[in-house]
Image (cartoon, helix red, strand yellow):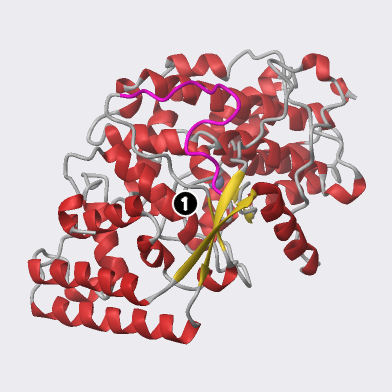
Amino acid sequence: MSEQNWSRETSRRTVLKTTAASIAGLSGVSSLAPLGRGAEGSRPQPVSDPEPAPAPAIHIAPDLREFNWPILLGNERDSMADALTGYVDDATVSREQKRTARESLKDIWAEVEIKSKTKPWHVIQKQREKERREKPNTHDSDRRGGQGHKKRQKSQKGGNAKPQIRRDDTTTVYKLKGDKQKVRTVLEDTERTVRQTGAVSVATTQDAESLANLSSVIESGATSSGENEEGSENISPQWKRGTKDKHEGHNYLARWAGKNMNIDDDLSDALFNNAPKPDGWDYDFPKIPERFEDPPTGNDRAHSYAHAWNPLTKIGHADHFLDERMNNAVDHAEESTERYQEVGYAMHFLQDLGNPLHTNMFLEQKLNEWVHYKYERKVAEYLEDGHILTENVENLEGYNPVPDPLPWEGSKWGEHGHQLATFSANYASDFLTIIMEHEGEDPLANSDELVTDTQSVLEKTTTYSMGLIGEIHPLYA
Ligand SMILES: [Zn+2]
């Protein structure tokens, strides 16, 4: 592959899609949904530029996961290789270091052998189920098939069909062919070489320390193309507004969940007051799965892990906290403030699961952190300012009831969150693409499609939030 293959004219959309494919690998996603919207609301993507080759569905065998394998896979997929060398070209490092980085990539691809094999999807799924069974403490139950939603179906708006992540019938499995020790040596040599050239001169203010190895050169190329005034911001996310004196999306969504369900105002107020609080808590996990190596918001891994759950990888903890807080809630008297304080906390985690940026494409966000912050802040501002988006939150009549999972299928509260996450995850790729295409602008003001999609996820988030109340308030007994 020559570096000339990489064309600057290649649109950002192409870059994004291509890296999204490699990302699935990097973060250990073992199946990749087609990069677009899922079954619900599937509309063709807006095409203003030639569509790139479709992203591959890929499955990464465990022996590969421990390595930096978007880099390793470069030899398998020309498009990935192009994206990687393109990122090297964009990196904020010296010419010399770029040259070394490009050559190092080629060395790796020449020396490390990767085996790929196409398998039907059901084979992969069986394999994963087996892996899961062998780890008895795994908390996430399998998602169920088409049943559920038995109760109060009449009150539900729209189609009842359970959103499904679309999968290709086949998927490509990547495995190491050579021995692991050799791979490790090759990667270490590469890092050393790239680091050494980095010490010679660095083209920007970034110091050589921060560009220690090939991955960081690539990452710097990926972020620099998405940098703007918000690139360095350090705000915590989650439907949140940047300024402290203003309300967050969580305040608003939780209050309206209560109002829509016609509960007493002081209970809606308890929801309003408590829903944002989990963002201010400290989180500590004895062990975050290694595969959660790419927290979407970069700076605080534990916080991101606590507020995320990815239906493809089943990684994240928001579903657990939702379950825990709802179990606390039902220990309190039916219409007590204490109960609704806990429901407010639970709603926070549930609402995060309605946000595509909390349920999918974590690495892509880590590489472009401004995307996550910008989107969440804009949505919160728009909600507070009475934008059209409020129509999808206020005065809704139907709600999504909490499902009745069978006993071995896990908690109903967790399952409720899983369903919402499965819905929202389908939007992540489009959200990222659109927001990045409108870098430097207000993406919601410039993309009708993003507005429509945001309306759709906000409405689901609200009707699922209402579902929590529908399960525990005497009005709905
Ligand atoms: Zn959150």
Q: Quadrant of residue 382?
A: top left
Task: Determine crowd level at label 1: few under 14, some 14-19, many 20+ residues with C-alpha closer than 10 A.
Answer: many
Looking at the image, which residue is at 86% across and 34% down? 334
Query: On screen, 400 above or below 336?
Result: above
* Left or right relative to 228: residue 281: right
Q: Main secondary structure of the magenta part?
A: loop
Q: Quadrant of the C terminus?
A: top right
Please say whether residue 338 is visible from this viewpoint: no
In the foreground, 212 or 296: 212
> What residue is pinned by disc 1?
362
* Left or right relative to 8: residue 329: right
* Left or right relative to 244: residue 126: right
Q: Quadrant of the N terminus?
A: bottom left
Looking at the image, which residue is at 42% across and 39% down? 54
Looking at the image, which residue is at 62% across and 37% down? 165
Query: On screen, 9 above or below 93?
Result: above
In the foreground, 304 or 434: 434
In the foreground, 380 or 357: 357
Q: Amino acid at mark 1?
A: Phe
Please say whether residue 328 is visible from this viewpoint: yes
Please state the horizontal and vertical placement of residue 293, each as a whole percent of the image: 49, 64
Reply yes or no: does residue 405 show up in magenta: no
- The magenta segment is 32-47
Please state the horizontal and vertical placement of residue 320, each as a whole percent of the image: 71, 52
